[in-house]
Amino acid sequence: MLIPSPSMVFVIQDEKEAQTETGILLAERNKRKANHGTIYSINADQVCPHCTEHFKRTDLKNGDRVLFSRYVAEQIEVDELKGKIVFSIPIDAILAKIS
């Protein structure tokens, strides 16, 4: 299992449907990437940007479903997760926890 750098999260993207509710198949280029997924690995250690204080985020953990900002997510390859889309995301780019 990969361990992310401090303040980083690895998220497995949720798979989107390849067809609409009415049964129309979507072309790959027309599909919008999902910006939600499941936390695969997290390093919740953070440093305050205004001081040198360290703290740990306790509201997020492995297995949580989250909504993230698509524009800062970097797609990575993880050997043990072949076929899955995995993103490396700064912990501050997690917008919400999905319950």
Image (cartoon, grey):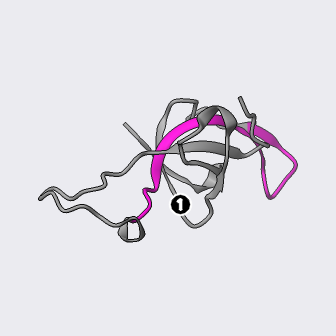
Q: Quadrant of residue 61?
A: top right
**Which of the two residues, 64 or 26, is positioned nearer the viewer here?**
26
Task: Give the crowd class for mark 1: few <14, some 14-19, many >=20 residues within 10 Å.
Answer: some
Q: Quadrant of residue 53?
A: top right
Residue kind at label 1, given as amino acid type: Ser
Give how far across and how far down residue 68 sits, in percent. 51, 54
Query: In the image as oriented, which residue stretches furthest toward the bottom?
Result: 30
In the picture, which quadrant includes the C terminus? Answer: top left
Residue 43 seen anywhere in this rendered image of the structure = no
83 vs 33: above or below: above
What range is drawn magenta here? 32-55
Whether the magenta-drawn stretch holds residue 27 is answered as no
Give how far across and how far down residue 79 sits, in percent. 68, 36
**Which of the two residues, 91 or 41, is positioned nearer the viewer here?**
41
Image-based side of 59 in relation to 32, left or right? right
Q: Which residue is mark 1?
A: 69
**Which of the two residues, 47 or 70, is positioned nearer the viewer here?**
70
